[in-house]
Amino acid sequence: MEIMAGIMRDHVLNLLREGARVDNRGLEDYRDLEVEVNVIEKAEGSALVKLGNTQVLVGIKVDVGEPFPDLPDRGVITTNVELVPLASPTFEAGPPDENAIELARVVDRGIRESNAVDLEKLVIVPGKLVRVIFVDVHVLDHDGNLLDASGIGAIAALLSTKIPKVTYDPEKEELQVLEEYEPLPVGRIPIPVTMAKIGQNIVVDPTLEEERVMDGRITITTDENGMISSVQKGEGGSFKLEEVMYAVDLAIRKAAEIREKVLKAVGSE
C-alpha cells in the first residue's frame, strides 16, 4: 500500500508541475456538480448532491422542543452525519468516527456562524417551545471532498424546507399544528470550498486519489457577501500566509459559482 501511495503521489505531483490533474481538470476547477432538491417525500426538506462521483443525500426534519437554557429566544439546529458503509470500504457501521464528527461540525458551523437560519423566528414560546431543525447528512458514495458536497447539500435542503404553521394557546398550554406550510427562514447561503495542498500546489475540490496524497487541507465557508463563517484546516501540513489569502479569494469566487447552481436548483422546484 505504501509503495502504491508513493507511486500515486509522484504521478499527481508530476501532473501538477504541468498545471494538470489526474482527471484533466485545472487546479481551480470543480468537478461536475448536480443539485436536486425535494427528493425525500416524507422530509420537510431534502437535497441530493452529486459532485463528480461523490454523492451525498441530506434530509431535514422539523420538530418542536425546548430551547437551550442559555439561548431561550432561539430555535435549535443540530447536524448529524452518517457514513454509509456501502459508500466506501473505509466506512464501518456503528457510532460516528472522528471523520463523521468533523464533517458534521464543519457543516453545522458553516450554517450556524453565518446565521443562515434565523433562529429567533423559530421561537414559539420563549424559553419553553421552539422549532428544532435536524440536518441529517448521508454519504452515499465517497470519491473525495465530502465537506463541500455535504455543506452544499445542507444549505440546498434548508432552502427547500417547508414547515407547518402552529398556534399556541397559553391558557390551555396547547400547541396546534396547522395544515398550512411556510418556508424555513433562511437569510444567508453559506457555501464551503475545500482546497488540498499537494507539494507546493493548491487544488480545489480534491478527489479521493488527491486526498490520499495531500499534505494538508483547508475548507473556507463564505456567504453571498463574501463574509467568512468558518475555516477548517485538516490533515496536518501547513499553509503560508500568502497561500491562505489565495485560498480565501478562491473560496469566495468558487462559492459564488456554486451558489448560483444551488439557487437555480431550488428555484426550479
Image (tube, rainbow, N blue to C red):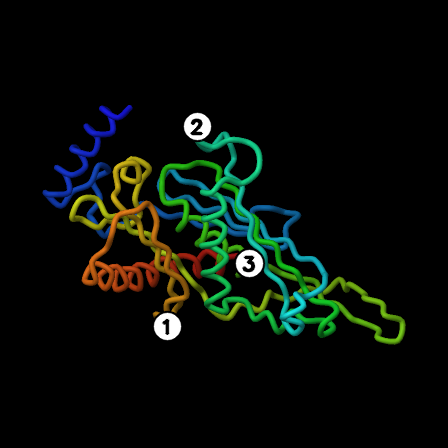
Mark 2 and mark 1: Cα distance apart in space? 39 Å
- Vertical relation: 120 (above or below) 160: below
Give the mark count. 3
Mark 3 and mark 1: Cα distance apart in space? 21 Å
Residue position for label 3: 160
The tag earlier along the polypeptide, 2 or 3, is 2
Residue at 49% across, 47% down: 101
- Element type at mark 3: helix
Front residue of 190/74: it is 74
Residue 7 placement (x, y as % from top left): 19, 28
Cβ atoms at labels 3 and 1 below 8 Å apart? no
Q: Which mark is residue 225?
A: 1
Instruction: Say few, some or many: other residues with alpha carbon within 10 Å of mark 3 (under 14 / 14 to 19 / 20 or more).
Output: many
- Element type at mark 1: loop
The tag earlier along the polypeptide, 2 or 1, is 2
- Element type at mark 2: loop
Q: What amino acid is found at the position of numbered circle 2 in the picture?
A: Pro
Q: Quadrant of residue 22?
A: top left
Q: Which mark is residue 89?
A: 2
